Image (cartoon, rainbow, N blue to C red):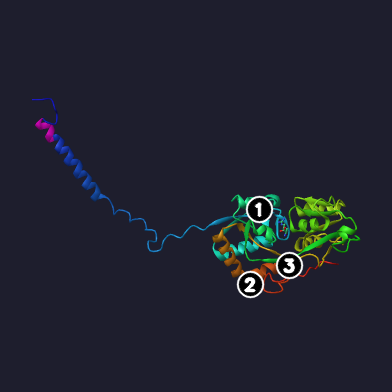
């Protein structure tokens, strides 16, 4: 006889018995259990799971009321913001706004740090080389802000009177003034934001500021007491704002255009316009400039 326990008949029998008991126990145990819980409800099998809603990052230079600015809570608000939110709702995507200084805004798009830009951006041929624009969503024009009592009455006066002129660097206002006074003119004072240029007008550091009509009119209206006035001039060419995407991002551009068309058709655009500019847009949205309530 060997000492191998399993080969001993007694051990073998004991082993079998134990195995049997175990098996029975398992079976009994299983039977004794209550109804197994119903299988978890299967995820709606028929329809494919909806694609997660895309969240796009929107760059905006939020120092450009009433188009984009930060309220007391630091939230980015304004006409552009509401237009893009409405477009997103219409076209079925989500947006997240990120304050992005103007001087780096186009680069941020180029680098892919922002998916789209809304920042009262004028559609220009030069910009079209490096980015794609939506259909126009707003008509604009340059205006000249001066202090009340200023001798400046027209665009050419900036040159004639050797005025110091404030602009936001790299804007269409900058372009217009640079064209008038020359690239190397020391009379042009460039600022990183339009509010900074306007502060300088207030303090007397510059004699005029050239910027978009909406912003100038807003500024004049919010500085009551007739301290400033806005001048229009036929020399300024009509401008149109567009929403910018990275060159070649046709998918996002199509969604934006589709949403924009939708909110123009259903009255949402006109309602937002009226909220910010008093009256609904004069002609089919974005076809006419808001009356420059300018010259006083
Ligand atoms: N419309 C002008 C331009 O495109 C000025 C835009 C400035 N926008 C802003 N959020 N700072 O050059």
Near mark 3 (Cα within 10 A), the count class, few <14, some 14-19 or many ≥20, is some
Kindly indicate whether the residue at mark 2 contacts the one at mark 3 (C-beta within 8 angstroms). no
Which residue was labeled with disc 2?
Answer: 267
Report which quarter residue 125 is drawn in: bottom right
The answer to whether residue 242 shows anywhere in this view is: yes
The residue located at (61%, 64%) in the rendering is: 86
The answer to whether residue 99 shows anywhere in this view is: no
Start-end of magenta stretch = 8-13
Q: Which mark, residue 277?
A: 3
Which residue was labeled with disc 1?
Answer: 106
Considering the numbered disc 2 on the image, is that residue within a helix, a strand or a loop? loop
User: Cα distance, mark 3 to mark 2?
Assistant: 15 Å
The percent position of residue 169, horizontal first and vertical second, equals: 75, 52
In magenta segment, residue 10: yes
User: Is disc 2's CB within 8 Å of ligand 1?
Assistant: no
Considering the numbered disc 3 on the image, is that residue within a helix, a strand or a loop? helix
- Answer left or right for 58 relative to 208: left
SS assignment for the magenta stretch, majority? helix
């Amino acid at each position: 006889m060997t000492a191998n326990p399993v080969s001993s008949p007694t051990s073998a029998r004991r082993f079998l018995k134990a195995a049997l008991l175990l098996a029975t126990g398992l079976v009994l145990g299983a039977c004794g259990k209550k109804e197994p819980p119903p299988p978890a409800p299967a995820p709606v099998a028929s329809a494919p799971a909806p694609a997660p809603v895309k969240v796009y990052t929107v760059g905006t230079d939020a120092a450009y009321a009433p188009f984009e600015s930060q309220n007391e809570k630091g939230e980015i608000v304004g006409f552009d913001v509401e237009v893009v939110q409405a477009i997103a709702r219409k076209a079925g995507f989500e947006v997240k706004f990120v304050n992005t200084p103007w001087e780096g805004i186009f680069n941020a798009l180029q680098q892919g740090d922002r998916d789209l830009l809304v920042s009262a951006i004028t559609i220009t041929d030069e910009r079209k080389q490096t980015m794609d624009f939506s259909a126009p969503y707003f008509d604009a024009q340059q205006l000249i802000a001066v202090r009340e009592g200023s001798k400046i009455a027209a665009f050419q006066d900036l040159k004639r009177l050797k005025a110091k002129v404030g602009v936001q660097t790299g804007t269409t206002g900058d372009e217009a003034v640079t064209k008038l006074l020359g690239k190397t003119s020391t009379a042009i004072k460039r600022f990183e934001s339009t509010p900074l240029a306007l502060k300088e007008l207030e303090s007397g550091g510059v004699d005029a500021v050239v910027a978009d009509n909406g912003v100038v009119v807003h500024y004049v209206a919010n500085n009551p007491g007739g301290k400033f006035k806005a001048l229009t001039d036929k020399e300024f060419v009509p401008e149109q704002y567009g929403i910018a995407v990275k060159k070649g991002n046709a998918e996002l551009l199509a969604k934006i255009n589709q949403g924009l068309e939708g909110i123009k058709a259903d009255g949402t655009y006109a309602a937002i316009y009226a909220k910010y500019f008093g009256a609904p847009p004069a002609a089919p949205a974005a076809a006419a400039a808001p009356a420059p309530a300018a010259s006083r």
